[in-house]
Each structure stands twice: as structure tokens, then as C-alpha cells.
């Protein structure tokens, strides 16, 4: 968890300007801190995100706003009770900014598995395929608009995100990744298996 929080005087800017800022950053050296600084100083106009709002009754949706070779920006819409599987981020840098509602993030660390030879492959975090997996819960946090940014990086890359049913409130969050993430490993701890899953955008289907 990064403790950077939006500045009290954070600018509310058009989505096109927000995207332009990310595109400009992608032309230089992309670091965790540079994106944290940008995201704590700039907030996109909520009503201009409406073309990217798409809901599904039984799952969250991933809706592409901008992407180039080095960075992607998505709006994710979470209905009440939606939950992701426990998953990796390929060791990429990632930032989550809440626009509406709240989400619970549980951070995990892989302790061991029975396919260690499949880990740390160049350009990818894991090839998956384990049938014995041990995870350790590092902690959980509640993310809300105006609160600290939630981040993933090469040290903290495994988590699960939930919109608890008892909160009874839909949520929307902006996600920025560098590099863009086209697949991830998902873990089924009950069945003790992990598999690689391709990722798609709901607003391009």
C-alpha cells in the first residue's frame, strides 16, 4: 500500500487531459513515484467517464480508456458482492484510484508451491501449473475516494479485491498499469491449483 493520498487542492481535469498526462509520462522513465505524484494531484471529471461505464450482473467489468505500449488506463465497475480471484500482476507496476464506493483489497505473498521452476520467467511472473500452493495473508485495506492509493509492484504483486455484499454499494475504480497486463495467474486455494488467464476489455466486446 502506498501512503500517498490525493492533495487537498488536487485538480479535477478533463479525461482527455488526464490521459494526456499519462501519455506524456509514458514517454519518459515510468516509476512508481512519478505516477503516485500525478495521481495524487489530478482527478478526472467523473461525468466524462460515463462512456466507459459498463456493468455486468455477476462480475466486475474492465473497460479500456487508453493504452499504448507502455501504459494502460481502465475503469473497472464493481457490482455489489463482486470479487476477483486471488491473482498476480506479472510483477508490473499498478495503481488503483477509487472514483465511487469502496473496495477491500487483501494482499498476499506466495510462501511456496510445488512448481518453483515455473516462477520468475523473463517477462512474466509465473507459468502456473502448481498443484500445491501456500499463501500468506499480509493484510487488508479499505480503499475509498480521497484515500491512499493502492499499488502493486515487483515486491507486492498478489492480491484479491472485493466489493463486500454487506456494504450494499456499487463501486468504480481507475486502474493504471505499466506495462499493460494481458494475462495473469489466478489461484484456487481450495482446489490447490493455479492457471494463467487471458485478460480482455468488456467495452471492446
Image (spheres, grey):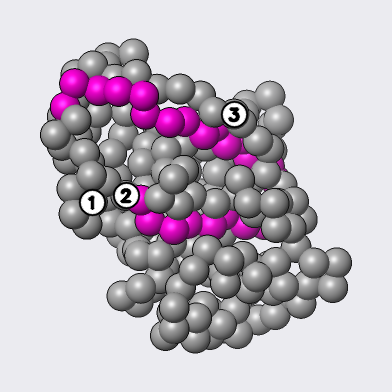
**Tag 1 near tag 3, CB within 8 Å:** no
**Left or right relative to 195: residue 138:** right
What residue occupies the far right of the structure in this picture? 8
Residue 30 included in the magenta stretch of the image: no
**Rendering coords of residue 44 (x, y %):** 66, 72
At x 30%, y 23%, the residue is 112
**Residue 59 versus residue 158: which sits nearer the camera?**
158
For the stretch drawn in magenta, what is the main secondary structure?
strand
Q: Quadrant of the N terminus?
A: top right
Query: Closer to the N terminus: mark 3 or mark 2?
Result: 2
What residue occupies the far top of the structure in this picture? 190
Residue on which the image places disc 3: 139
Query: Closer to the N terminus: mark 1 or mark 3?
Result: 1
**Rendering coords of residue 155 (x, y %):** 44, 45
Residue on which the image places disc 1: 124
Question: Which stretch is magenta?
Answer: 91-115
**Tag 2 near tag 1, CB within 8 Å:** yes
Q: Secondary structure at mark 3?
A: strand
Mark 1–mark 3 Cα distance, whole angstroms, equals: 25 Å
**Left or right relative to 32: residue 98:** right
Classify 10 Å Cα crowding around label 1: few (below 14), some (14-19), many (20 and above): some
Mark 2–mark 1 Cα distance, whole angstroms, equals: 5 Å
Amino acid at each position: 500500500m502506498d501512503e500517498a493520498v490525493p492533495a487537498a487542492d488536487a485538480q479535477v481535469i478533463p479525461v482527455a487531459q488526464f490521459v494526456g498526462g499519462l501519455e506524456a509520462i509514458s514517454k519518459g522513465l515510468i516509476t512508481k513515484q512519478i505516477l503516485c505524484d500525478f495521481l495524487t494531484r489530478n482527478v478526472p471529471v467523473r461525468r466524462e467517464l460515463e462512456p466507459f461505464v459498463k456493468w455486468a450482473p455477476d462480475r466486475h467489468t474492465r473497460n479500456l480508456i487508453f493504452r499504448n505500449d507502455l501504459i494502460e488506463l481502465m475503469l473497472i465497475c464493481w457490482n455489489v458482492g463482486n470479487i476477483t480471484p486471488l491473482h498476480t500482476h506479472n510483477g508490473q507496476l499498478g495503481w488503483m484510484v477509487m472514483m465511487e464506493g469502496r473496495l477491500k483489497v487483501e494482499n498476499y505473498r506466495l510462501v511456496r508451491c510445488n512448481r518453483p521452476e515455473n516462477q520468475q520467467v523473463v517477462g512474466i511472473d509465473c507459468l502456473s501449473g502448481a498443484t500445491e500452493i501456500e499463501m500468506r495473508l499480509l493484510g487488508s485495506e479499505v480503499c475509498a475516494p480521497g484515500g491512499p492509493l493502492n499499488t502493486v509492484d515487483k515486491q507486492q504483486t498478489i492480491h484479491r479485491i472485493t466489493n463486500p455484499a454487506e456494504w450494499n454499494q456499487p463501486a468504480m475504480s481507475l486502474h493504471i498499469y505499466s506495462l499493460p497486463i494481458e494475462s495473469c495467474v489466478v489461484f484456487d486455494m481450495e482446489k490447490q491449483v493455479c492457471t494463467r488467464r487471458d485478460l480482455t476489455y468488456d467495452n471492446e466486446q
